[in-house]
Image (cartoon, rainbow, N blue to C red):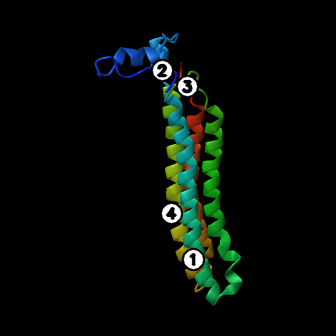
Amino acid sequence: MEGVPSTKNGTGALDVMGLIEGLQLRESSELPSTLDRNPPYAPFYGVMGVVFSSVLTSAGAAYGTAVSGSGIAATAVMRPELVMKSIIPVIMAGIIAIYGLVVSVLLSGELGPSLKYSLPNGYVHLAAGLSVGFAGLAAGYAVGEVGDVGVRHIAQQPRLFIGMILILIFAEVLGLYGLIIGIYLYTVNIKE
């Protein structure tokens, strides 16, 4: 291969010095303290915050939609007139994914090259993504389970509707708490 220095010297041993010279390393103009605060892998933590916020809230919303949707299908067999009234748990489950989308967009706007993105910022953005993600996952689970059982029982006893809606609101608020924490962590200013 042309242009690539030989890795073997005349004795057949590995030519380490030739390999090092071939890398054409130069002295870095960055101070060690800057590299400690802004290492090349710092943006990885921010990106993972974006990923966790969107993926976990979407998983919670998908679970809530699927479980409560099966309850709606079972209810529609006996009482088809209740389908539109029973769609509320599916709507509330979908809102949970929007919480993750909001935090993902906010965090994405803060991402930048590693020389301008510090490691503490990466940690805070990861924590913001995890807080909204896990809260959304829990809220989606709660909305799905309450929606499934609630919709099935409303077909038998219509007076349970208001109680089911109140329980769904309290389950949805769990995701809202994660959104609030995520936005708060997004606004935290880490001193450089």
Q: Examine the rendered structure and indicate whether residue 147 appears above or below residue 93.
A: below
Q: Which residue is mark 4?
A: 141
Q: Amino acid at mark 3?
A: Ser
Looking at the image, is mark 1 or mark 2 earlier in the sequence? 2
C-beta proximity under 8 Å, tags 1 and 4: no
Who comes first in sequence, dot 4 or dot 2? 2
If you read the primary sequence from the N terminus, does the residue marked by circle 3 or circle 4 appear first?
3
Residue position marked by numbered label 1 in the rendering: 70
Q: Secondary structure at mark 1?
A: helix
Classify mark 2: helix, strand or loop. helix
Q: Amino acid at mark 4?
A: Tyr
* Amino acid residing under circle 1: Ser
Closer to the chain start, of discs 2 and 3, is 2
Q: Nearer the viewer, mark 1 or mark 4?
A: 1
Q: CA distance from mark 1 to mark 2?
A: 50 Å
Residue drawn 49% across the image and 16% down it: 34
